Amino acid sequence: MRDRLTAMLVLFTLGMLVAGAGAAAGAPGDSSASVPDDAARATFAGGCFWCMEAAFEKVDGVYAVTSGYTGGTEVDPTYEQVSTGTTGHAEAVEVRYDPVRIGYDELLEVFWRHIDPTDAGGQFADQGPQYRTAIFYHDDEQRARAEASRDALAVSGRFDGPIVTDIVEAGPFYLAEEYHQDYYQKNPGCYESYHWNSGRGPFLERVWGDETAPTETAPTEMAPADTTARETDDELSERLTPLQYYVTQESGTERPFDNAYWDNERAGIYVDVVSGEPLFSSTDKYDSGTGWPSFSRPLEADNIIEQEDSTLSMPRIEVRSAGADSHLGHVFPDGPEPTGLRYCINSAALRFIPVADLQKEGYAEYVSLFE
């Protein structure tokens, strides 16, 4: 379990380890073939690189954002080494951008609006030198602009404490493991939960409110997260329990009356254990007597796929999640009114979020269901 997640007061286990991740940290530079050779380069450390990558990739004029490690002396560091806080490296992002469409000053503004520049010990739930904030300049002009930007922020009155973000010369940048790249797109549910529960989301909301940096895409114009960029089998087998993997990835079935939610009577919603997609609500849950969680209808119909299943002698209708393509269970025409349907779902495919946690976990839109 990684440090940042144990520091969070969360309800889920992420458990992403390096073994089998499939990408070596190593050679400095950018691996994206879509980045022009003359693209400008900027490097920032703002705590968790998942969050910084998500922030900069939404900016018009940015070609690519890569998560990695920089600022230390260890050559080709791994996540395990950096996370000890002893390598001198910080989690960072390298931004490749078109200086004609966006200037370095605008990138600095995006950076300041996504961190707490007054925290010298780390960022939010992630504490330690590996989570420090820093601007790594690539030339004297970037250094001068970064210092001017920092000084302007210091006198703006936006923050109560002094600005402690380092401004240092850029050195070698080592790519982070592949499962860290575009994490916010591969695992949108887990990412959003982490972003809020780590304290970053509430802090930015309190300090900046609805303000966005001028170069950022407005929320109404943002492209939806790419839920088709799924984790590999190796990554899922590391993150999920053996039963969760068996059910969701191998279309298995757990034992009746011996699973997490068959008799759960708490109010809340059930989301996909893989992606966090909202699937079912306790308001539609009932005791079917089968020993599995049963629902009369889905919470979000668009998040459910129903397809014919002929693996047994009697044809059935399988239920899968639309985003993660997780096997959930089956639906039968013997449920209660008004739908007459019984969605018989495996607990291992679900994660339950109680009403009290809906807002902080990023599901505030469903609170009204229980008022």
Image: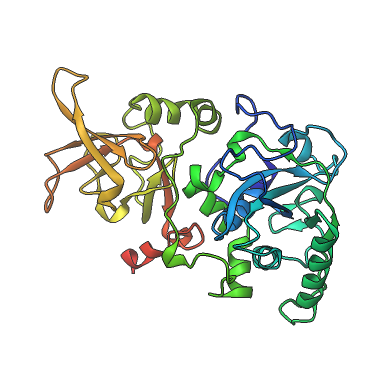
Which quarter of the rendering shows the C terminus? Answer: bottom left
Residue sticking out furthest to the top: 313
Foreground residue, 344 or 178? 178
Foreground residue, 24 or 16? 24
* Residue located 58% across and 36% down the image: 179
On the image, the x and y values in percent for residue 186 come to 49, 42
On the image, the x and y values in percent for residue 239 come to 54, 33
Q: Is residue 172 left or right of residue 31?
A: right
| Vertical placement of residue 14 versus 233, above or below | below
Residue 354, picture quadrant: bottom left
* Residue located 88% across and 39% down the image: 73
| Vertical placement of residue 182 versus 24, above or below | below
Foreground residue, 117 or 331? 117
On the image, the x and y values in percent for residue 199 come to 63, 61
On the image, the x and y values in percent for residue 337 come to 11, 51
Asked if one can make out residue 351 in the rendered structure from this viewpoint, the answer is: yes
Which quarter of the rendering shows the N terminus? Answer: top right
| Vertical placement of residue 231 versus 359, above or below | above
Residue 212, picture quadrant: bottom right
